[in-house]
């Protein structure tokens, strides 16, 4: 079951990004899911599924938004990930 979230925004916002309304709405959805992933609120698999992407495609998309898939990117975090692998 899908839910709908309506977000009101001024038309100039989409125009300032040179996006159609449809493309702007898509950008908002992608940005929101990437931010939720970055905050650790959703997994990469969940975000990918919501965007109808493969998990690999979602992880590649993170680079476009300058978000790492290595946690906070600190050496300690990377070492912990390697120990848990």
Image: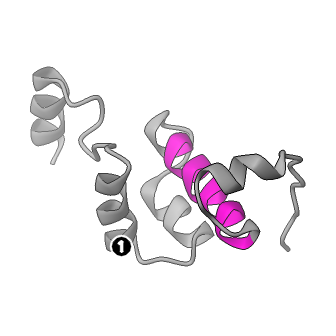
Left or right of 9? Residue 21 is: left
Q: Main secondary structure of the magenta part?
A: helix
Range of magenta residues? 22-36
Whether residue 35 appears in magenta in the rendering, the answer is yes
Instruction: Give the residue pinned by disc 1.
Output: 57
Indicate the colouring scheme.
one colour
Q: Identify the residue shown where x is 15% and y is 48%.
A: 85
Q: Identify the residue shown where x is 29% and y is 29%.
A: 72
Q: Identify the residue shown where x is 58% and y is 53%.
A: 17
Q: Position of residue 34 (x, y in %)?
A: 50, 49
Left or right of 1? Residue 60 is: left
The N terminus, quarter of image: bottom right
Look at the numbered disc 1 and give the secondary structure of its residue.
Answer: helix
Q: Is residue 49 above or below residue 13?
A: below
Q: Position of residue 16 (x, y in %)?
A: 63, 49
- How crowded pointer 1 is (Cα within 10 Å; few <14, some 14-19, many 20+) is rated as few
């Amino acid at each position: 079951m899908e839910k709908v979230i309506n977000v009101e925004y001024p038309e100039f916002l989409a125009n300032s990004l040179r996006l159609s309304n449809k493309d702007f709405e898509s950008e908002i959805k992608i940005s929101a899911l990437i931010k939720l992933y970055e905050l650790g609120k959703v997994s990469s698999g969940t975000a990918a599924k919501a965007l109808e992407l493969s998990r690999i495609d979602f992880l590649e998309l993170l680079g476009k938004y300058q978000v790492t898939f290595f946690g906070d990117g600190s050496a300690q975090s990377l070492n912990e990930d390697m120990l848990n692998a």
